[in-house]
Amino acid sequence: MLNEIRLGRPRIEALDDMARRNKVDELNGFIQAIIQSEQLGVGIANVLRIQSEEIRRRRRQRAEETGQKAPLKMLFPMACCIFPTLFVVLLGPAALQVLQEFGVK
């Protein structure tokens, strides 16, 4: 992008081409906001502040979504590995006593 600007291409076109080349949603949204602010004459500081808040919000939402999926992902290992061991430890002595009682009579 910087090389294109140095060669004389308008900054808006260079930014737009960079967004198309990278195909990253966050970068595309950021560049579109910068292009809009430049066209409307809005200060870049406000745009950067708003964009940073938006990116933080998206990151927080992704973290919450991942956190909500964690219990479902832990269910299968717990059911297959931890619960059988727990049953053997807790119910094993009781089962041995029941077998001894019925075996003697």
Image (tube, grey):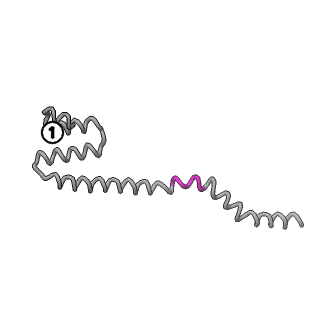
Residue at the image position 27 percent from the left and 54 percent from the top: 54
Q: Position of residue 25 (x, y in %)?
A: 29, 43
Residue at the image position 24 percent from the left and 52 percent from the top: 51
Outermost residue on the top side: it is: 7
| Residue at image mark 1 | 11
Q: Position of residue 31 (x, y in %)?
A: 22, 44
77 to 2, vertically: above or below: below
Image-based side of 24 in relation to 97, left or right: left
In the image, 55 versus 74, the foreground residue is: 55
Residue at the image position 13 percent from the left and 46 percent from the top: 38
Q: Position of residue 5 (x, y in %)?
A: 16, 36
Which quadrant would the N terminus be assigned to in this image? top left
27 falls in the magenta region: no
Which quadrant would the C terminus be assigned to in this image? bottom right
Outermost residue on the left side: it is: 41
Outermost residue on the right side: it is: 105
The number of discs equals 1
The crowding category of the residue bearing disc 1, from other C-alpha atoms within 10 Å (few below 14, some 14 to 19, many at least 20), is some
Q: Which amino acid type corresponds to the residue marked 1 in the rendered image?
A: Arg
Residue at the image position 68 percent from the left and 58 percent from the top: 85
Q: Position of residue 65 (x, y in %)?
A: 41, 54
50 to 95, vertically: above or below: above
76 falls in the magenta region: yes
In the image, 98 versus 22, the foreground residue is: 22
Q: Which residues are magenta?
A: 72-78
Q: Secondary structure at mark 1?
A: helix
In the image, 18 versus 58, the foreground residue is: 18
6 to 73, vertically: above or below: above
101 to 85, vertically: above or below: below
Overall secondary structure of the magenta section:
helix
